[in-house]
């Protein structure tokens, strides 16, 4: 007989942590994953110490969607998705673009 039993399905386990981990399959428990690299952790206590090294990789954060960027100018360009700003205008036809590269291609 096992000392730790799943309250939902009755399956037995020799360790409490194994039972706790197992019970998550019944509760649709979502593990805590790093939004930067995808590494999965069983709880927030293990996720938090892992994240600071990533902060140096992408220090610029969009205040609207929380997406991170390596360079400030890329963040500024990205934010136009949220604001609808189209600052680059074709002098011939007046069509506007959110990125200078798209204007140049036009």
Image (cartoon, helix red, strand yellow):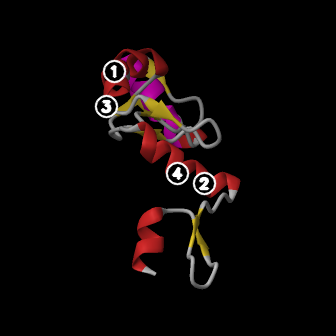
Eye-nearest disc, 1 or 3: 3
Q: CA distance from mark 4 to mark 3?
A: 17 Å
Residue at the disc numbered 1 = 50
Pointers 4 and 2 in contact (CB under 8 A)? yes
Q: Residues within 10 Å of mark 2 (few under 14, many from 20)?
A: some
Give the camera-side residue of 99 and 14: 99
- Tell me the number on the disc at residue 78: 4
Can residue 30 be spotted in the picture? yes
Q: CA distance from mark 4 to mark 2?
A: 5 Å
Q: Which residues are magenta?
A: 13-25
Eye-nearest disc, 1 or 4: 4
Q: CA distance from mark 1 to mark 4?
A: 26 Å
- Tell me the number on the disc at residue 57: 3
Left or right position of 57 against 78: left
- Tell me the number on the disc at residue 31: none
Give the camera-side residue of 82 and 52: 82
Residue at (60, 43) in percent of width and height: 65
Q: Position of residue 33 (x, y in %)?
A: 42, 35
- Which quadrant is home to the N terminus? top left
Q: Position of residue 43 (x, y in %)?
A: 45, 22
Eye-nearest disc, 2 or 3: 2
Q: Residues within 10 Å of mark 4 (few under 14, many from 20)?
A: some
Eye-nearest disc, 4 or 3: 4
Residue at the disc numbered 2 = 80
């Amino acid at each position: 007989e096992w000392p730790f039993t799943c309250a939902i399905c009755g399956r037995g386990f020799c360790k409490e942590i194994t039972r706790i981990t197992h019970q998550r399959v019944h509760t649709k428990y979502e593990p805590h994953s790093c939004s930067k690299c995808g590494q999965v952790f069983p709880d927030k206590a293990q996720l938090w110490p892992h994240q600071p090294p990533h902060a140096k990789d992408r220090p610029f954060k969009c205040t609207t969607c929380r997406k991170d960027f390596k360079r400030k100018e890329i963040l500024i360009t990205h934010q136009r998705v949220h604001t609808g700003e189209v600052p680059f205008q074709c002098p011939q036809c007046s069509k506007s673009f959110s990125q200078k590269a798209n204007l140049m291609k036009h």
